[in-house]
Amino acid sequence: MATTTSQPPATDTESTGTSNNNNNNQAHTTASLYVGDLEPGVTEGILFEFFKNVGTISSIRVCRDSLTRRSLGYAYVNFHRTQDAERALDTLNNAPINGRPCRIMWSHRDPSLRKSGVGNIFIKNLDPTIDSQQLHDTFSSFGNILSCKVAEKPDGTPKGYGFVHFEKQQSAEMAIKMVNQMVIGSKQVYVGKFVSRREREKLKETSWSNVYVNDLSPEVTDDELHEIFSKFGDITSHIVMKDSDNNSREFGFVNFEEHEDAVAAVAGMNGKEIHGKVIYCGRAQKKSEREQLLRRNYEMLKREKLNQYQGVNVYIKNIEDSITEEKLREEFAQFGEIKSVKIMTDENGNSKGFGFVCYSTPDEAQLAINKMNVDRVLPGCTKPLFVALHESKEVRNQKLAARNARNKDMNRGNPGMNFPNFYPPQQPMSAGYYYNQTGMMPNQPGMPNQPGMPQPGMIRGGRFNPNQPGMPQQFPYPVMGGMPAGAPVSHTQNPAQTPVQTSAPTPTPTSAPTPTPTPTPATEPEVQQESAEAAEENDVGITLEQLYELPANKQRLALGEKLYVRIQKYEPNLTGKITGMLLQSGWSVEKLYELLVHEETLKTKIEEAAVVLAEKQE
């Protein structure tokens, strides 16, 4: 970090499109500078190297987006002495940082001066060779300049206009009077008072005079267009647009001398028929204005549509190919009046596996969600439906971004430990040994901190708990083979004090690591006594009735042991994490049991969990 102290920057306010130099070394109460027009890759370290020779730096902060952490293109540099800040402003302004000239100005806590427009002028029709420094040198003789900038395109080429912000309004007025219509470089420039975009939009509504005429007949000529519109007032120019072959493009423009005449022409000619075609007349707009208007109208219609179907549109997932819209309507019609049913399909007409059902009232939609979202499997299908209220893409993206941001904050400095690992059940082994994925290692006295074992002060998920001194007495999941879940385990247990299991060979401490054995669940006695008929009936090794007979705190453990074996077939490298995610998902025991019964549903959940874990790694 390229800061000498942790002192925060003097201000958080962002400068507008105009900011640059101060040549008069005016006394300032703070030594904080605003640095703008930064290349996205500029960091605090780069800025420290750039400013360090000027004076002692108090702090540097590059402002970033709170969600994406990308640079916003500006920063604040605080010096200990005002003289050093003045020197940086005089010597480093417009100097390149990572190949892009920066612009430096005093940082103002109060943005009222910048936003008021007092002393701000606009320069148009600049020569392409004029840069910000040359523009500053041209106008510096009229007074103290707070900021100066030539607008540029993303590729760095100038747009042909710029801004100069003087400290005093008198300096701005003098610059307009003396420089307007003068030649700078090779072009005659226009210099005038800066007008904000909002004010310009208001002026357009009350001062426009150019009329756009569309849907003209190909027979209409320039002279005929002038004759048709001349009755509304004096016309300064008119044209029918033509293509390269001199054929009419069937639209044109008529520019009136007065705004009122243009308004009268639009009111009198819009919708009139000329040569058998109904024409359109309206205010001439730039392409950007038309796109903005269309975008605004689209967003308005979109919001109205969302509000209209808010709380009544139900989203349904895991729809199999055999389900048609008629069958889906039949299944959901019992909960209320359905306005529409739609199953989404691709370009070939194949189902995408999800769809929507729109009810007439929110109560009906909520009833359908409550009844159909409890592991409901449609007749002839194998997947249980997922039913929820429809959410717009923007809302889903916001929730996803917020969740990712929370996870990043939780795991900052401890990557890769987002979810608790489920410690799988192991084959019975002799006491004094534990099992991990690299083989069997002896649990020797005096060496409690071995890989794969919970550590002192650690809580589930691998995070350190400073308020839990000493060694834990129990593991959240079974680690020692041949022991009941939750049984006390001592980290300094003497192998001689524990009876050796005769059903498994006793490894020696010097034996080489062995391949990972197939886990065998170490369950409670009730689970071990399950009947062969029940296991053969549902092929999951345990019935729901037997699960209910277990204590509440042992039910999820027994399910985790079964799920671990199933998940290992599909994601052997992520088995522990995915099992832990499923157990910590908040689902009921019945829903977790359904994952054992329905293999396809379990595969879907495994794939979703693997995607989430992959995103975390990125």
Image (cartoon, rainbow, N blue to C red):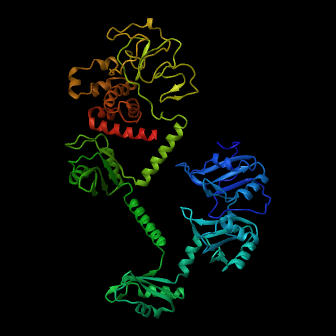
Is residue 257 in sight in this rendering? yes
Total number of numbered discs in the rendering: 0
What residue is drawn where x is 30% and y is 34%? 595
Residue most extreme to the top = 496
Q: Quadrant of residue 23?
A: bottom right
Q: Position of residue 162 (x, y in %)?
A: 63, 69
Q: Is residue 371 above or below residue 116?
A: above
Image coords of residue 207 (percent x, y): 55, 81
Would residue 96 be found to the left or right of residue 320 on screen?
Answer: right
Q: Position of residue 617 (x, y in %)?
A: 45, 38
266 or 139: nearer the eye? 139
Q: Is residue 489 above or below residue 333?
A: above
Task: Name which residue lies at 20% across and 27% down.
Answer: 537
Which quadrant is the N terminus positioned in? top right
Q: Nearer the viewer, residue 137 or 196?
A: 137
Q: Does any portion of residue 523 appear in the rendered image?
A: no
Q: Position of residue 180 (x, y in %)?
A: 67, 79
* Residue 212 sits in quarter: bottom left
Is 489 left or right of 152, judged from the image as shown?
Answer: left
**Of 59 and 555, which appears nearest the observer?**
59
Above or below, 455 against 431 in this view is: below
Left or right of 490? Residue 151 is: right
